[in-house]
Image (cartoon, rainbow, N blue to C red):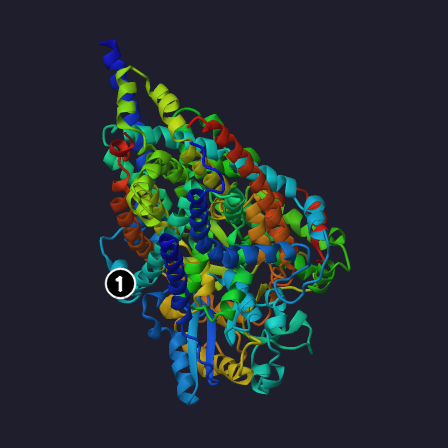
Amino acid sequence: MVKNLTNRLTNAFIFLTLLAISISNLYPLFFMFFNSLKHRTDYLIDPFSIRGLSLTWENYVTMISQFKILSLFGNTLFISFFTILFILIFGIIASFAFAKLKFPGIDLIYLLIISTMFIPVQVTIIPLYIFYSKLQLVNSYWSVILTYLGMFLPEAILLMTASFRGIPDELLEAAELDGAGYFDKLRYIIVPMGVPAIVLTIIFYFIVTWNDLFTPMVLLQDMSKRTVMVALASLLSRYSGDPTFQFAGLVLATIPAIIIYAIFQQYIIKGISAGSTK
Amino acid sequence: MKKTMRLIIFGLVIISTLLAATGCAPAAPAAPQKLTIWINARDSFISPSEQKLSQDQWYISQAIKRFEAANPGVTVELVPQADALQAHQTFRTAGLANNAPDIANLWGGTFIYALRDVEADISQYIPAEDKANLIGWDTVTLDFKEGNPIIGYPTPDNQMCFFLYNKKIMTEVGLDYENNPPRDVETFMADMQKIKDAGYLPMAADEGAGYPYYFFYIAGYWWVQQNGLEPILAADRGDAKFADDQALIDTLKLYNEIWAKGYMNEDAATSGDSWNKFLQGEVALFPSVPTFVKDAQDALGEENVGAILPPNFSANSKIKDSLIGGPGQSLVVSKSSKNPELATKFLSFINSKEEVLKFYETQTKVPVRKDLTPADLKLQPGSVGDKLFSWSKNYIFWVDNSLSGPVVDNFTKLLPLVLTGKMTPEDFAAELDKVKGQ
Amino acid sequence: MKISAFSPFHKTKAIHGILSIVPVMVVLLFIRLYPLASSIYRSFTNWDGLYRNDWVGLKNYINIFTDSPFWTLLRNSLVLLLSVPLQIIIGLFIAVLLYEEVKGWRFFRTLIYLPQIVSAVTIGYLFRIAFGLEGPFNIILQAINLGKYTMEWLGNTWTALAVLVFCLTWFSIGWQAIVILGGMTRIPLDVFEAAKLDGATFFQRTFLIIVPMIVRTLEYAVIMSMVWTFTSVFAFIFAITNGGPGYETTTIDYMIYTKFYQAGSNFGFATALAVILLLIIMVFTVIEMRFTSAASDWE
């Protein structure tokens, strides 16, 4: 009886804690949404009061009709898609090597690759820009995608190598005895068993590339190629611009990120190797 | 072996796909009659109300169309920059790659002087008419020195720093700032006490939130007005010491005193909501620039918003009844430009009387042209706009656009400590001396 | 079964291994290593970002150690690192709760990641207001009779740093939870169920069953959040404390950022600071990798 009560209390405590964290997580989004329904002046007077809250969707309508936010989505989507595609292709095969195809010196190479993450991107942007301009790549999406590959491949390799290391060697050896080649191993063992890491890679780098401001701001100097975050950042400085209009755009811009997260997180399921290890 | 081959082919396919994809990027056609212009996406040519319009309806896009129509064969491409600070870096980098736009909207003074290696000298192309009719040429002339190369035009809007005030509070306290504004510090401090006694906050600022505007808008004026800008620039170059600058020490003492006496929000070093409070009607005075006026009028009612000059520091000051201001932004021509003469022609066009009048249909700022009257701009006599206009001819250029980067950085970082009495003005001046002349 | 290093079997494997990392090496060579090498070279010059580029030897490094608030910056970066163990432990607990399908787990799992989607500017602004003198945090303290503890949280060194640690932790919990959940997918279900049937408590399940099985995932989580804290938090600091009071909450990456953007920037100084940061993170990473290698030896 007593144990039952303590259990219930513990469960209630856990539930309330998780609820509090969830509400605090939801709040910034709610704050943006709530203020996107106001007029500029009412927001400036008090961003935290319901004063001036109108239920008009004017900011959203203008965002779509005048600001053409949906075509900006297309630009960012292009960059995000190809960044993730190449991160997955290059990252999976490299992580396979780092985890399972050891050769002398590979650990040093691994550390070298990882250590390229340790320097802020601002530091390297000038030499990079000049490199791209020699290749006529400035103002091309590919300059942004290449920069992202340089920034995020080491991170993704760190993640996927950690995951692939957990795949039992016996499985690979057994497959080899059955005559499985490099690609068979990738396709039938590494990728299926690495699904959680691959899914996390997709989620992380979709959201990071979707929200990034710095790289596209420097490399894409063409109105028609701007990414959604760069375009939205242009709307506001500390005391000028229209914050409520920008909030409407920011709220719309979270939707693709939330969808990607909601879809892919479902693939993180329990006991992924339960059937195959034994 | 077969598998190794497959692997090699696979690798090659990936690499070549990538290279092919990157190779087909369009190379910019080098049309000699094309101008590219970067503008700050906010705070210069695009007003808040224009942001909700599509790009071809903005004033600046319309102006470009008129320029193109007047100059057949010329096309102008407009590229707004999302972040004004970053635009300086991007311009620098693009200049280094010989890829910079013909014209870029950057901050005047030291910010553009630091980029002189990638900026073009356009002195020879500037029409005499512009030289005579525009103010602010010093801010685009290297090192503020007359006779040095001119690297651009000031933007058509003049900024200036003053106090916005809440008329309702002043009336309640019994102060008539329309007819009898405080002109010296003693009166000003006595007024602050009166406002405080009446239960209102005399002044508010977010001094620690990135840009210490109470100092750079108001106290900076007290500093420069005492002996002029030259001794300050000398200290910045390393030819004198900030620690020996009595005007700086005295100014900082007053700067701190206003906070210490409770004439400001107690949390001025960490707050982020002082503007909200002014708009809510809780605060009497707010250090401002013209961009703020319209929001204040919208929030408090046009009849409740007034403007005054900052009071004079002392009767012995070298400069009096002035304020900090001047065109803080500029439009510079880059060395990468294939056609600096055409670029200058565009800048001249944008600053012409007709264009400036059209520009001011969408803006609440103050022009840099000398040949405009308040009537041209449809300013009501006695209105805030009219007052700003009358002050605009007599300004002291921004201190923070005049000092070198490391000094401004230390200034910005350490000022909140001086404000709240955690650092003495003497120690502060010594900290500036550590980084000057770099 | 021991295979000699020269057996054909092993050789194919090595060739596969080398070929597998070639694409990554090519990308990184041009996109990261070349700019990195160029930055290291520039750190020994007085580079202004343009054409001034004279060799000055160790001058920038000497300046950093003698003439700049470097030790304060380092202290601040190290203090913010405290958020790494905090976010990992909280993230771990949440991941285990979600794994055990606590009531409402689907709902929580969807919301937990939301902070990562919102911009640092908005989050920073909300934290600045929340911990303001008249902000909600102080109001709550007053409401629960702790009014004497109200203060200007962002105005004092240690409380301002504590707010930053809190913010970074709050921001990263969801990320950690999802990473750890990903690592937990490989735990065989029967192992976990057996432990539960044996009456292992929540903490026993977490630390004795789960943690040993996800050492590699934790290694990844530690390295990533450490690197992130060292190199990428200036947007939060800018919005919350602006590095103040004075330089009391300015970190190394924040200083690098500031130096890059000031008029007449000394890029040589900024790159030298970045090289020092690189070395610091390198030391931390190698120590961390040694530690986890030892921990996962019995895997």
B417 w.r.t. B398: above or below: above
At a point 66% along the width and 47% down the height, the residue shown is B253
A278 or A89: which is nearer to us?
A278
Closest to the observer, B220 or A135? A135
Q: Is residue A161 above or below residue C40?
A: above
At label 1, the amino acid type is: Ile
Crowding at dot 1, Cα within 10 Å, few <14 / some 14-19 / many 20+, comes out as some
Is residue B242 positioned above or below B152 on the image?
above
Residue B175 appears anywhere in the view = no
Left or right: residue B407 versus residue B2 is: right
Where residue B254 sits: x, y (%)? 64, 48
Residue at figure coordinates x 66%, y 57% from the top left: B223
Residue A225: x, y in percent?
A: 37, 67
Extreme-top residue of the structure: A1
Instruction: Give how far across and how far down residue B15 sits, in percent.
Output: 41, 61
C111 sits left or right of C276 in the view: left
Provide the secondary structure element on which disc 1 rests: helix
Res. A154 in view? yes
Closest to the observer: C145 or A12?
A12
Q: Of C254 and C49, which appears nearest the observer?
A: C49
Q: Which corner quadrant holds the N terminus of chain C?
A: top left
| Dot 1: chain letter | A
Tell how many labels. Answer: 1
Question: Mark 1 highlights which residue?
Answer: A64
Residue A16 position by quadrant: top left
Q: Give residue B424's quadrant in the image.
A: top right
Residue at (73, 54) in percent of width and height: C57
Image quarter where the C terminus of chain C lies is top left
